[in-house]
Amino acid sequence: MSSRYQGIRSLLRMAWLPAFVFATTVSAGMAFWMKLQSDANAAALAALEHRADAFVLKVSERLRAHEHLLRGGIGLFTVAGRVDRAQWHRYVEKLDLPSQHPGLLALGFALSVPLSELPQHEAQIRREGFPHYHVRSFTRQTAHPEATPVVFVEPYQGLNVRVLGFDMASEAERRDALYRARDTGTTTLTGRVTL
């Protein structure tokens, strides 16, 4: 054999060990890094799932609390029969919405009124001390047989004043939820609505 071939062979014998150690170290380092990334991703995903579960629980609890408020209103009407504005005011006042239900701006009651009786209804509310009361619709179309105006809203202040007389059945999302709740006897959520 030529000395040149033996020189290359000798060089390869000396270089394979460092090359092997280098390749093994890089491979182990990459495997370790990939495991760390995988663990970090799993931990981040677990944290995200935990936060999402906590958020869903909090929203569910809040909706349940709001449902209890509505059921309390049903109890008031069941016990009192006909509820007047002062009774509704006292009921909502005792609920202490700002501290017990932060974020809930008002609690209202809407009455189903046949369209043929709207003039008498408006006259009655005006006699109760609201001289400018009239039933307002979300849209100008009246394709339903009745209006469902808000007749009580508490606290009656700020933007809540504008709610009095609003026909809840004049907007499709609200009307569908109203009728579903009426027909099933259960609380019902609307889809997205404009306040």
Image: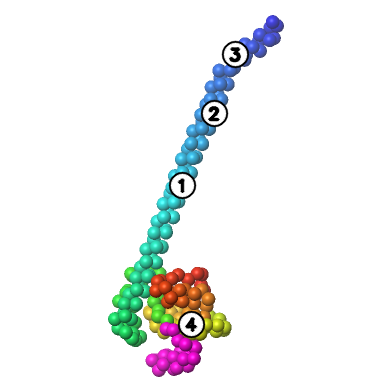
**C-alpha separation, residue under disc 2 versus residue under disc 4:** 72 Å
Report crowding for label 1: few under 14, some 14 to 19, many 20 or more residues within 10 A (C-alpha): few
Mark 1 and mark 2: span between their CA atoms? Answer: 26 Å
N-term-proximal mark, 3 vs 2 = 3
Q: Earlier in the sequence, mark 3 or mark 4?
A: 3
- Viewer-side label of 2, 4: 4
Whole-number angstrom distance, CA of label 1 to CA of label 3: 47 Å
Q: Residue furthest front?
A: 183
Q: Say few, some or many: other residues with alpha carbon within 10 Å of mark 4 (under 14 / 14 to 19 / 20 or more).
A: many
The residue shown at (40%, 71%) is 186
What residue did someone put label 1 on? 44
Q: Earlier in the sequence, mark 1 or mark 3?
A: 3
Left or right, 84 with respect to 49, comes to left
Q: Which amino acid, mark 1?
A: Ala
Residue at the image point whose x is 49% and y is 74% from the top: 176
Residue nearer the viewer, 155 or 59: 59
Residue hosting label 2: 26
* Residue that protrudes farthest toward the top in the picture: 1
Q: Based on the displayed image, in which of its 4 quarters is residue 57 positioned?
A: bottom left
- Which residue is found at the position 42% from the left and 59% from the top? 56
What residue is disc 4 on?
167
Q: Give the range drawn in magenta.
A: 111-135
Do labels 3 and 4 touch, CB within 8 Å? no
- Label 1 sits on a secondary structure element that is helix
Q: Residue at x 51, y 32 (%)?
A: 31
Q: Where is residue 163 in the image (x, y as percent from the top left)?
A: 45, 81
Q: Where is residue 80 in the image (x, y as percent from the top left)?
A: 30, 83
Mark linked to residue 13: 3
Query: What residue type is disc 4 on?
Result: Asp
Give how far across and how far down residue 64 sits, in percent: 37, 66
